[in-house]
Structure formats: C-alpha cells, structure tokens
Image: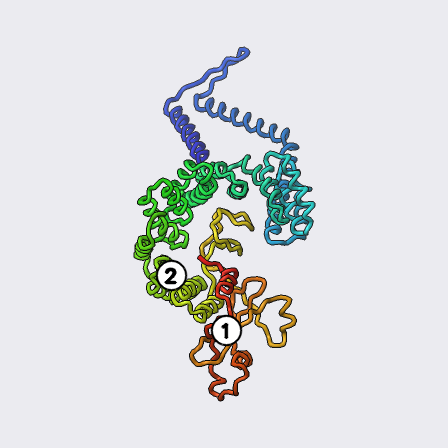
Amino acid sequence: MIRILFYLAVVFALGLGFAWLADRPGDMVITFSGYQYRVTLMVAAVAVTAIVAAVMLLWWLTKSVWNSPFAIARHFRARRRDRGYQALSTGMIAAGAGDAALARKKNKEAAKLIRSDQEPLIHLLEAQASLLEGDHDAARQKFETMLDDPEMRLLGLRGLYLEAERLGDRAAARHYAGRAAGLAPQLAWAADATLEEKAERGDWDGALALVDAQKSARQVERHVANERRSVLLTAKAISLFDSDFNAARTAALEANRLRPEFGPAAVAAARALFRQNDVRKGSKVLEAAWRAEPLPEIASLYVHARPGDAVLDRLARAKKLQSLRQNHPESSLAVARAALDAQDYGLARSEAEAAARMQPREGAYLLLADIEEADTGNQGKVRQWLSRAVRASRDPAWVADGVVSERWAPFSPVTGRLDAFEWKAPEERLGHLIEQGDEEEAEDRIAIPTMRAAQSPGDDLVEVVVESEDRPEKPVEAAKIDEAASAADGGADKTSEEEKDAPIRLPDDPGVDPDEERENAQRRFRLF
C-alpha cells in the first residue's frame, strides 16, 4: 500500500511539473559544434524524461539477464526446500498419529531435500520414527547425538529422560532432569523431577530454593507453590526437631502459615509451641486444622497438650475439640478415649457407639471392646465387638499410590511424587472363604482360631473369623456351628427344630485367656 501511494505521489508531482512548464512558455537553445539547436522548454522536459526512463529500463534488463542463473538456482533451491519442509511436516503429523511407516518414509524424503545441520527437526522425526518402530536403542543414540548440538540439547535430554522413565531407571531419569534443570530452570518436567530427587535425598533447602525459583519465574501458580513449600517445610521441621529445634520451629510455623488447614504442618507447629510451653497458641493452631480435617494425631496432641493435666481436664479438652467439629466420628472417638481414661464408661460407650453409627469401622469397635472389658469384663461381649471389628471397614490412614502408612510422609515411596499421601480409608480387598472340605489345604495358608460354642438363647452369636497371612479386609460371613454347639453341651439331647434354627451364641468362656485374645486382635488391627 505504501509503495502504491508513493508511485501515485511521483506521478502527481510529474503532472504538476509539466503543467507548470506548459503555463510558462519558453525556448531552450543548445549550441554544439557550431550548430544551434532551439526547442521549446516542454519538448526538452519530455526528452529528458524519456531518456531517463530508457536508461532505467535498459539497466533493469541488463541486471535481469546478468542475475538470471542465480535467480533460477535460487528458485529451484526454494522449491526443494519447500518440498522438504512439506515432507517434514507430514512426517511429524504421521509420527504424532502413530503411523511409523509414513513417518519413516517422510523422514528419508526430508533428509534428502534438507540438510540435517540446517533443520534439527529431522533428527527429532528420525527418533520418533524409531520409537514407533520399537527400536529404542536407535532412538536413544539419536537423543544422545542431540546433546552435542546446543540448539537440540534440551530436546535430547527430554528424550533420554522419557526413555529412562520407560525403563524404570529413576536414577538416570533424574540425572537427565537435573542437567535440563541446570540449563533451563523454567522447564516444568525437569524442575519437578529434580524437586522429587532432592526431597528423597532430604535436601530440603535445595528443594525449597527450586520451588522459589519456579514461583519467581511464574512456572506454577502461587497456591501450588505455597502448598509445595508447606510440604517441604513440614518435612524439614520433622527431620530437624531433635537435632536443630530452632530451625525446626521456624520451618513448622512457616509451613502452618502457608497452609493452616494442613494437618501434618499444624501438628509439627503445635509440637514446637508446646515444647516452648506456649499451649494457647499451639492449641489455636490445632483447632484451625481440626475444623478443616479432623485427624487422630491432632486429637491426641490437643488432649495431651499439658502433660500434668488430670484425666478430667483431658476429657474437658476433648469435649471442647468435639464442639469445634460436631457429628464427626473422630470427634466422638476422641471424647470416648478421654472418657475411658477418666473411667467414665457411660460417656465413653455412648460416644463410641455414636462414632460406630456414623461410620462403622474397626477402630470404633475395638474401642468398644476396650470399654466393655474395662467396665464389665464380659468376655463374650468383648469378643462380639472384636468380631464386628473384623468385618468392619478399615480405619482411615495415609495412603499414596497403594501404600498405606500410619505416619505422613512428604513423598510417595513408590513414584517419589511430592505431596502424594492423602488421609482416606484404604481400598478394601476380598478375603478368602473357606469351604468345609478344604481344611487340609487351608492349614498351609491360614490359621483358624479355635472357639467353644454353646447353644443358649441368651448367649452371643458365634461368628467364624478367618485370619490369613495378609490382613483380610472383607469379613467371612457368619456361620452357624451346630456340631460345635452340641459338643460344648457335652452330648446333650437333640434340641427341637426351632432351637436348631436359632443362632448359636458365645457365652463367657473362662477357658480363654482374654489378654491373649486381645493381643491377637491387636496384632491383626491397628489401634489408635
């Protein structure tokens, strides 16, 4: 557009010039070799303009003829380059679509039309084609070749990192990620892998510096960076609590400030504050975390904040904690445990039963068994609660990538992923149902506890519990044991049909050691 306007301006200026000359007539006399040439001023102007135009046209023709071989060669080179880039583009699309044959064909075509030192993407297409063909060795060699080219080095490191991840070589993968992070800290995949490696080595300061660099470069959102810092600071506080208390306290308080609802950070901060006898501030920290997510560790630390408190004082603190998060199983269990310590068995039983109604799980039933044994000593009811604990769902725990841990950890032991542990109930697995004719085969794999049974309308129901090598998560269905009941009666007469159909219940059995049975139950389950 600018060139057109410039051309129009020149034509307009020439028109104005000729019009100006036409309005002012005059003659131009030229004397040359004794001759005089007289022409009008207009004719002279037209002649000069025509001569200039002819010279320019002649110069353009001469230049075009002189440069024609170069122009022709440049045209063919451009055409060849365009064909090469078209083949390269088609090959990259084919590689992305998983068409190995077409990707290899277009890679060879592009390599013929374009020099690989001029277009590094040819190396990438060749590596992708090798991966699609399953030739991982050739792909790794191509990625290693890219390390020599500064322009392709990061791409080569990325390829080698993915290959190491595919082979499960975490050490090699993190080595390549560390090199990439050193060259370009803005790479998210390299920074994340390096962060996990530093966390596993316990280099908390190095991991925190890397998170700060990501936050400064705006690679991650602000809240994501704060969550990562909170996790790393909590882990640092836990590791330094006994060796460097001041540093641990500073890290724990900062972690709690960044993420007040995070339970492990609140516990670490409260422990540090309680150690300095700052019970009020530490209790406030635990109360804020308890409102967000009630955890048994928070309740235990809150109730026992002052070691010199009497059992009734601890019960009062448990009730205060319950008021902050009502109608929650953990709140009821906290009060029930404190009431059991205070020997208030009525309150302990009512709160434990309330927790079992809200969320039937093994911890509530085991606590009810403890309460029953401490209050009445009725071993039949104790075993009844224990049998219900066997069939109940598991208590929540820290779970990451299928690994269940009673304590929080900053990273997953399987994948090394940061902040992987979540507080939830572990996944249930089906137990083994033992058939009547499989006793001999089952003896090699499981242990069936021996029980005495008696058939009496007032006794508790007998339930057969199978304990396998792995802890069973699903209960074995309740079974009626008629032969065992009749044997326990000492060969009594046959009962009526109605009595046979009645459920068999377990009476108080003085022949069974309750301490031994409780110890076996505690080995099977986790008690709070």
Describe the element under mark 1 as helix, strand or loop. loop
Mark 1 packing: few (<14 Cα in 10 Å), some, or many (20+)?
Answer: many
| Residue 231, quarter of the rendered image | top left
Q: Quadrant of the C terminus?
A: bottom left
User: Residue 331 sits in which quadrant?
Assistant: bottom left
Name the side, left or right, on which 371 lies relative to 175: left
- For residue 149, which numbered disc appears in the image? none
Which kind of residue does numbered mark 2 sit on? Pro
Instruction: Indicate the position of residue 18 as horizontal and vertical percent values.
Output: 41, 26
Precedes in sequence: disc 2 or disc 1: 2
Q: Which residue is mark 1?
A: 463
Q: Callout 1, which amino acid?
A: Glu
Residue 86 visible here = no
Viewer-closest of 365 and 391: 365
In front of the other: 230 or 152 = 230
Q: Residue at left 43%, top 21%? A: 41
Q: Is residue 170 above or below residue 98?
A: above
Foreground mark, 2 or 1? 1
Q: Residue at x 37, y 25 (%)?
A: 23
Residue 453, x across and y down, in percent: 51, 76
On screen, residue 104 versus residue 218, left or right, reads right
Is residue 501 visible in the rendered image? The answer is yes
What residue would you read off at disc 2? 329
